[in-house]
Each structure stands twice: as C-alpha cells, then as structure tokens.
Amino acid sequence: MRMSAELLTLVMFGGLLVGLFMGHPLAFVLGGMAVIGAYLGPGINTLGIIINNVYGNAMDNYVLVAIPLFILMARFLNDSGVTEKMFDAMRLLLANVRGGLALTVVVVSVLLAATTGIVGASIAVMGMIALVPMLKYGYNKELSAGVIMASGCLGILIPPSIMLILMASYSPVSVGALFAGALIPGLLLGVMYALYVVLICWLKPSYGPKVPKEERAEVSTKELLIMLGKYVVPPMSLILGVLGALFTGIATA
C-alpha cells in the first residue's frame, strides 16, 4: 500500500498525537509510527535500510555515547532534588525584584540547559515547580507559561546540547566546535529573556508582583548564602567541569 507524502504526514502526525494522549510511552509511539509510516509509504522493506543504518553506522559512532550519559546526569539532578532546591535558593535571592519568579525560571533553565542539554526535562521540571507559585502570587498567565516554555527550550542551544551532539554525528564538525559556537548565542538568548521579563514587569507591574514581605523574611542572609553555596554552586561547577573538559581538550570529540 502506497500513500502520498502529504497524506502520510497527516496520518503519522495524527497517530502520534493519539498515541501520546492515550498515555503510551513516547519511545513506543515514535517507533510504532515509524513502522506504520514505512509500511504505508515507501514499503515495509524500508525497515531493513533503517536497521542497517542504526546498527551498521550509528552504533559505531562513539560521539553518541554522550547522549545517554547526559540523560543519566539529568536524572540524577532531578531525583536528588537539587533542581527544586536550586529554584528555591534563586527564588529567595530574587524575591525583592519585580518579576523575580520569572527571572528565577530563566536562570535555573539556563543552569539546567548547561548541565543536562535536554529540552523536555527543563520544561517539565519548571512547569511542575514554578508555574504554581507564579500563579499563586498573581503573575500574568501568559507571561508565566511563556517564560517557562521559552527558557526551557534553551537546552537545544546551550552546550552540552543533545541536538548539537546529533548534528556533530552527521557532519564533519566536531562536538567541541559546535559547543563553542553555540555557547555565546545560547547565553545571549537567556540574557534577552531576562531583560524582557525585567522590562515587561517594569512597564506592567501587575504582570510580575514581588513576593510578599513575610515570605521574604523567612530566610536570613546567612541562610540564603548557605543555600546558594549548597544548591547553586555545585551545578555551576558541573557546568565548568563538562564544558571546561571539552574546550580545553581534556575530553574532546
């Protein structure tokens, strides 16, 4: 059975949405739609080419070994509770600033992007730990959702980005070169997000009100510094360790 490319695209996209909304694991939905697409499109024999490409070419690429290790590092950060503690520390640090919670989302998303390189993880984590407090304190809904989605996508650009690793595996450019080229643009994008939050909350104070004074007074300056040292400095050290090893040639690829 052959199907036109246009109709096949609609069928696969619709099947992907149906599978995800039914609660099936993403890996099985993507794999299943790939098999169905091969059967309805070029033919089931195409699967042999895909298998040969994966096990004959991709499995010999040692650069791809970094991907599951970065995912494992993201899992460690998430399950250890470091992300939530890091968010709390930055939230208290910026509590006296208008739009402080939105700025905290940007800063923490940049740190997560620079430690894990996973887009979905940043968006999911920030959505769980930041959206409820932002709405609780009266933040604008559009601003709250927008800053989480935009900042969470920084993981696709800021090294170590899994997308950049995949690009390096199919191009003559090394992972280190791609990381070096994407670092400054990614950080600049994060700075632009932060400047936008500051500007919009200055022009429209109701979009990002300050945290109530009684909550700001819960933690002393000494306790705040201890929190920053325990939960913000280690992830930053991890960033310097990963990127420093790549840029200095200790762990090149």
Image (cartoon, grey):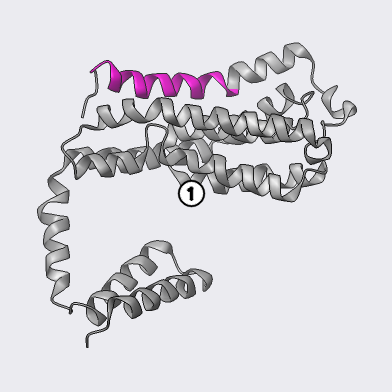
Residue 66 in the image, given as x and y percentages of width and height:
28, 37
Q: Residue shown at 16%/43% (left/top)? A: 61
Magenta stretch, residue numbers: 231-249
Residue 56 in the image, given as x and y percentages of width and height:
9, 55
Q: Residue shown at 74%/50% (left/top)? A: 141
Q: How many marks overall?
A: 1
Helix, strand or loop at mark 1: helix
Q: Nearer the viewer, residue 115 or 196?
A: 196
Which quarter of the figure has residue 202? top right
In the picture of the structure, the residue carrying the numbered disc 1 is: 120
Q: Residue lying farthest top? A: 222
Give the vertical position of 178 relative to 130 (above or below): above
| Kind of residue sitting beneath label 1 | Gly
| Quadrant assignment for the N terminus | bottom left
Q: Residue shown at 42%/71% (left/top)? A: 16
State whether the magenta stretch is mostly helix, strand or loop.
helix
